Image (cartoon, rainbow, N blue to C red):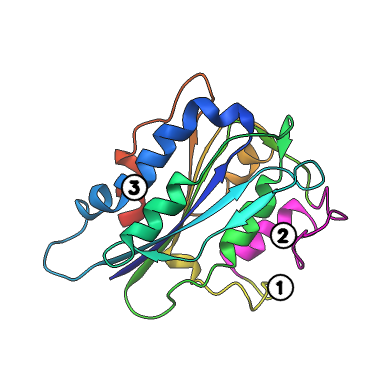
Amino acid sequence: MNTDVVFCVDVTASMDLLIDDIKRRILDFAQGYLRYLTKDEAHNVRIRLVAFRAYGEDEAPMTETPFYDVSSEWDGLQSAVASLRCDGGVSETSGLEAFALAMQSPFVCIGERRTAIVLFTDAESYPVRKGSDAFGYPEGMPGELAEFATWWEGGAKRPERIGFTPEYARLVLFSPDCYPWSSLEALKRCKHVLMTSESGVPDFEEVYAFIAA
């Protein structure tokens, strides 16, 4: 079975107290996740990172990596995770754009599979398309919050570039209870875990089980 996981990580300065724990959780993911799968089948786990700040406010508002195969590209994954640094930012982020870019990842789309997006933030996101006039703002982003549900859950208006199969997808939001995360938790196959810079990163055991289910 193939499992593709995209970790979207808020790397603004306020996340500095959380980032080391988040890095550890990312690197420990495959080992913890595989404990929830049957042992009589082969498993392939790939991990991709999307690090975000805010378009229009930061020089490096969004950084994406390719997928790393945990079994054969471990050094590359370790290096990418180690490069996550928290700085800059304002009280809100371009977290919605990070989620949209994660949904456009080149997921495995055949055979037995799982697709997961795990997002970490301690802040609200800017409204959709705020900062869209900034250099490097990605093309084709959703125009309103409701459009994220169409991208995630499928439907006639879903763009062709969204290649994952909805029933195989899981979304995990580690965030405060605020816009837009408290609204997105209503999406199908979504788990919202409350997290703030003061509370620390919650336990991952339920997340492993949720993605594996």
Q: Determine which of the numbered discs, if any, sits on residue 147 in the image.
A: 2
Q: Residue at x 44, y 45 (%)?
A: 82
Crowd around label 2: few <14 · some 14–19 · many ≥20 (10 Å): some
- Labels 2 and 1 touching (C-beta < 8 A): yes
- Considering only vertical position in the picture, is 206 above or below 117? above
Q: Name which residue type carries label 2.
A: Glu
Give residue 60's position: percent from left, percent from top.
Answer: 69, 48
Give residue 77's position: percent from left, percent from top.
Answer: 39, 56
Magenta span: predominant SS is loop
Q: In the rendered image, which residue does mark 1 sit on?
A: 157
Q: Name which residue type carries label 3.
A: Leu
- Considering only vertical position in the picture, is 203 above or below 8? above
User: Camera-side residue: 41 or 68?
Assistant: 68
Give residue 7's position: percent from left, percent from top.
Answer: 48, 51
Q: In the rendered image, which residue does mark 3 sit on?
A: 27
Crowd around label 3: few <14 · some 14–19 · many ≥20 (10 Å): some
Q: Which residues are magenta?
A: 129-154
Query: Helix or strand or loop: what does disc 2 sit on?
Result: helix
